[in-house]
Image: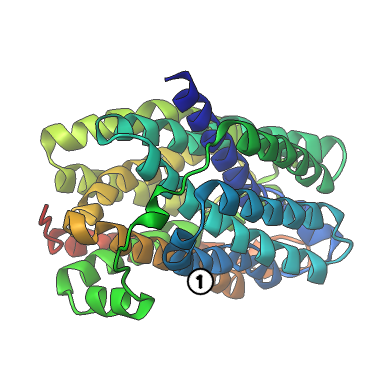
Amino acid sequence: MNREKLLLWTLAAINFIHIVDFMILMPLGPQLMRLFEISPSEFGLLVSSYTFSAGISSFFGAFFLDRFDRKKILFWVYVGFTVATLGCALSPSYGILLLARILSGLFGGLTSALILAIIGDVIPDARRGRAMGLVMAAFSVASVLGVPLGLFLAGLSDWHTPFFILTGLSLVSLGMIFRFIPNIADHLGQEVQRPHPLEVVKRVTSNSNQMRAITLSVMMMFGQFMIIPFLSPYTVANVGFTELQLTYIYMAGGAFTIFTSPWVGKMSDKYGKLKVFTIFMFLNVIPIAVITNLGVTPIPFVLMISTMFFVTSNGRYVPAAAIITGTARPENRGSFLSFNSAVQQLATGLASLIAGMIIGENALGQLTNFNLVGYIAIFFSLLCIPLARRVKVVS
């Protein structure tokens, strides 16, 4: 059992570093836009490049990663991720940073696929839910500790520092992979007929219920990730926060979701996933409307609204994930979720890209049209409610 715990802690550490690597760029937006003299659309491309490459690699990775010993392929994929993260830390220009982000996303997407595969291979079904919970808790820990700490250190020095620290932590994680993850090669001796990527796409696109579930995923990403990448630049340029004060937003939002996420899960089981999803989706519209129209505002009010945004965003995702997962039968669930994850990543990137093209900058350095982006995000969010009612859970 101790070996199992060490394996899970290793996977959780890897997941934590990967998530912080993805999230840290968004709150660093004000520094990067100022130092590289880039526009909101160029910053949007910087954010979306990671998710585009992660989406593509996580989808195709599901079909070729099974040909290797899990430990060996994870080790070499993570070496690639570590080198790409170091590339981010050393980037002297916007173009090189963009290339490094694409490579980080490419290896990060493969890392995510491998973590799920290892849990499925090593942890018995009876303990798999708890194991998944521990590894996925890295997201909340990344929000509460990783991102604010990275921002704080970036505020004390510069934007390179968080990436140097992530590179160092990645090296430690490589040692943990080598030491605590056993060789996992049992799947290599099994002659399993694995579906071709095009077969998976055809299977999903020919199932109208699963297509509605995929569309729901896309709409939810548009409702959230048109806002999140530009929340930090807007809060600094228009609301009057310093770059150090941004840490408050992520600490408060992350801390609250640690407590509200399990509660929402219980409420979903007790009162129905669709009902809880609908309530949180309506509630989520309120902070989106307020936060995208703020001028110079006192810190406590901004923290109240931003925390409500994070809590309600998380609150709608918990029941939605259960609804979407339930549209696939167990024998097809892995390939469906792989496809759904890839589409989600691509939708996240597209949302950031579109928002960056809409948002402008005035002579004072303030961001313009963020309210318009907010209205579009609200439109997509509200579309999710009737759409979710048409998604049928089959298992």
For the point 46% across and 35% down, which residue is it?
A: 135
Q: Position of residue 96 (x, y in %)?
A: 81, 68
Considering depth in this image, is 113 or 287 the residue closer to the camera? 113
Considering depth in this image, is 272 or 392 the residue closer to the camera? 392
> Is 248 on the left-hand or right-hand side of 206?
right
> Is 338 on the left-hand or right-hand side of 168?
left
Considering depth in this image, is 103 or 149 the residue closer to the camera? 103
Name the quadrant containing residue 242: top right
Rendered position, 185 above or below 343 = above
For the point 68% across and 40% down, which residue is it?
A: 174
Amino acid type, residue under disc 1 in the picture: Leu
> Is 146 on the left-hand or right-hand side of 390?
right
Rendered position, 101 above or below 306 = below
Rendered position, 353 above or below 260 = below
Q: Which residue is mark 1?
A: 350
Considering depth in this image, is 238 or 149 the residue closer to the camera? 149
Name the quadrant containing residue 256: top left
> Is 333 on the left-hand or right-hand side of 246?
left
Q: Identify the secondary structure beneath mark 1.
A: helix
Name the quadrant containing residue 205: bottom left
Count of labels in the image = 1
For the point 13% across and 41% down, which residue is it?
A: 272
